[in-house]
Image: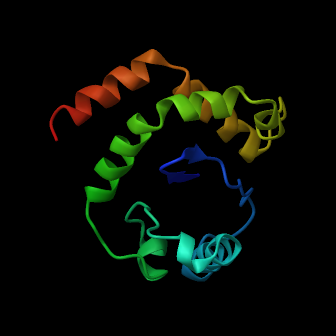
Amino acid sequence: MAASTGGAMFIKAIDASGNTKDAEYVANLFLQVIKDLGEANVVQIVTDNASNYKAAGVAETRFASSFIMAKRLREVKTSLEKMVMDASWKTYRADGNTLAETKAREVKKCIVDDTFWDQLDYLLSFT
């Protein structure tokens, strides 16, 4: 997912099931996306602090990235709702049982869940 002044947009999904998500794999994914988008168009990559992300060269920020992501999720809520309702999303949310399809259903369930957004607002009220 990418965000700009024009709004949020879905870039790509990767079914990484069956792959070892070590530092080399993650770094290669990041580099490929940066190459696809163009270096000048990528300002920041926000991840969690899992060891594979740290080893891939992402600076450790403790929990700051979690709050940055939570704030950004709130800012792009409308775009996320449009994304999971879009016909193209069906590609990622088919009724199959692959890991990617299961995750896509979980993502949609969160995005359309008012309780999720209420809890996110509560969390952000402390920042």
The single residue placed furthest to the top in the displayed view is 114
Query: Which x, y percent locates residue 29?
Result: 65, 73
Question: Is 29 placed above or below 119 here?
Answer: below
Q: Which residue is drawn at 54% across and 79% down?
A: 23
Q: Residue at x 47, y 66 (%)?
A: 45
Quarter in which the C terminus is drawn: top left
Name the side, left or right, on which 111 lies relative to 19.
left
The single residue placed furthest to the left in the displayed view is 126
Query: Which x, y percent locates residue 34?
Result: 61, 75
The single residue placed furthest to the front in the displayed view is 6
Question: Is 92 placed above or below 57 here?
Answer: above
Question: Is 119 placed above or below 3 here?
Answer: above
Nearest the viewer among 87 and 123 is: 87
Query: Which x, y percent locates residue 103?
Result: 66, 40
Query: Which x, y percent locates residue 109?
Result: 59, 25
Nearest the viewer among 92 and 17 is: 92
Q: How many marks?
A: 0
Q: How is the image coloured?
A: rainbow
Name the side, left or right, on which 74 lies relative to 88.
left
Q: Which residue is drawn at 32% across and 51% down?
A: 68
Nearest the viewer among 79 and 47 is: 79
Nearest the viewer among 98 and 87 is: 87
Q: Residue at x 79, y 43 (%)?
A: 98
Name the side, left or right, on which 27 lies relative to 85.
left
Determine the image quadrant of residue 81. top right
Determine the image quadrant of residue 87. top right
